[in-house]
Amino acid sequence: MDTNPGGAAQRAARVVALLGLSVAILTGCAAYRPLPLPAGPDAAAGPDRLKMDLAQLRVQPLGAIRIDARKITPLAAGVLAALNNPDLRAKRAALGVPAAEVFAAGLLPDPQINGGVDQPIAGPDTHTAFSLSPSLDIAGLLAAASSERAARFTASQADLEVLWAEWTTAQQARRLAETVLADEARAVRLRPTLAAASARAASSTEALGRHDVAASAAMADEAARLDAADQLAAAEQAARQARRDLNALLGLDAAAILPLVPDPAGANAYSDAEIAEALASLPRRRPDLLALQAGYAAEDAKLRQAILAQFPLASAAFAYARDPTPTTTVGVSAALVLPIFNGGRGQVKVQAATREQLRAEYQARLDQAEAEVKDAAAQRAEAEAQANAVRASAPRLQAMAAPAPEALQRRDIDSGTYLALTQAAAGAETHLEDRELAARLAQIALETALFIPPVQARTAS
């Protein structure tokens, strides 16, 4: 039985302290939580199931666009793609990883405590020996600031890359929506042409049976019908394929029908001066260029970290000990790295070479961006010039084809002449719409490369 109240109190205090230390350690540990995988696909069944919360839209050039679920314009389709694209959702979820790495890099190295107890079992000295030695990772402390700086730049790079992906995905949705509208309009225009060609071919077949026309004429009419049918089938197939691609981009079920309508007429196109100004400011605005800048800064921080890692003092420790005599000692110790064979020089070389590589990649992207802008501007100018030329000749063809239906009813012209006139007018309209579509797609490419608001959004704002 212990008759020393002071000793009992000391032991109780040690137990309480040990319990408190254990609780403190356990509360700093993370707990496991299961996260099951999805059971199946989650594509939206219809446009009304798509997310339309513009407050979540991060792409600044699209900020002025409003969405009407009953009338989806190509611009609205771009916004919906930025909000609902499955790949973008995965990329945004992945941003939690670099954010966690920033948190991890900001944590200082934990101090370590080494302790031991020795109980003599033989010899003249009978006192219990013990030692206590707390130590600190000096190298880890020196690298902490550079490590956190690199992690922050890496997280910024990842976020900017996702922003650029959102922008390019939105622009791809605009291109697909424009293609759908153009192909469906072409199909609508080709159906009367096919009907006229079919009637002409049927009439020729009947006349051939009566030996009223030559076989070559009937074959030519049938070939014209087949050509019109092929053109209509190609337009319908292209429209269906573009719709499926657009649905996939928006996370819609393949069978869903998006109520697409053309964009309203926009303001005047960007002038050459505005394009030059936007091009000059690209390094300060375009997300992919900013992402490369952040990646370069992260690598620069890693190079600094590698240089600091050459500091020879790795760790330091304080020691408090008592031997069985009992003699109590206090001391310090340090671990030094002798830079004889390695000295961290290899890692410094690697990081320096990587930084030079990233610098070259940034320069290449700058050159590519300028080339994209100039190419898109040239394509837009060419398509607009061609569209203007076709537009100037269209009234003459339309004037020639306009009286054709009445002339056919009066039998002033035969069905062959009527078909030729309608096909010529339809061909001119098709060529004009092709050039106008090419101009719109070139405008989208120009806006994509310059990271500027669409022309229609300028009007809306």
Image (spheres, grey):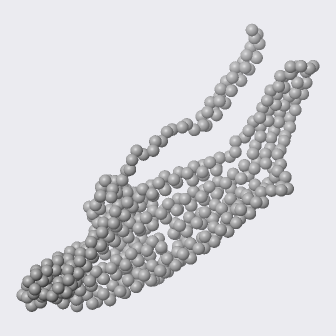
Residue sitting farthest toward the top: 1
Q: For the point 45% across and 58% down, which residue is it?
A: 88
**Left of 320 or right of it: where is 361?**
left
Query: For this rendering, which residue is in front, 144 or 431?
Result: 431
Q: Which corner quadrant of the image does residue 58 belong to?
A: bottom left
Residue 64 visible, this angle: no
Query: For this rendering, which residue is in front, 318 or 204?
Result: 204
Residue 155 visible, this angle: yes
Quadrant of the snapshot with the N terminus: top right
Q: How many labels does the image show?
A: 0
Q: Position of residue 172 (x, y in %)?
A: 41, 67
In this picture, is 356 found above or below 99?
below
Q: For the point 44% across and 76% down, which residue is it?
A: 446
In this picture, is 97 found above or below 114?
below
Q: For the point 77% across and 40% down, which residue is it?
A: 135
Query: For this rendering, which residue is in front, 210 or 182?
Result: 210
**Left of 402 or right of it: where is 430?**
right
**Left of 228 or right of it: where is 80?**
right
Q: Where is residue 258 in the image (x, y as percent from the top left)?
A: 29, 62
Q: Where is residue 362 in the image (x, y as percent from the top left)?
A: 60, 70
Q: Which corner quadrant of the image does residue 411 belong to?
A: bottom left
Residue sitting farthest toward the right: 124
Q: For the point 47% across and 71% down, which residue is it?
A: 451
Q: Which corner quadrant of the image does residue 332 belong to?
A: top right
Quadrant of the snapshot with the C terminus: bottom left
Q: Where is residue 119 in the image (x, y as percent from the top left)?
A: 83, 22
In this picture, is 266 found above or below 259?
below
Query: For this rendering, which residue is in front, 360 or 15?
Result: 360
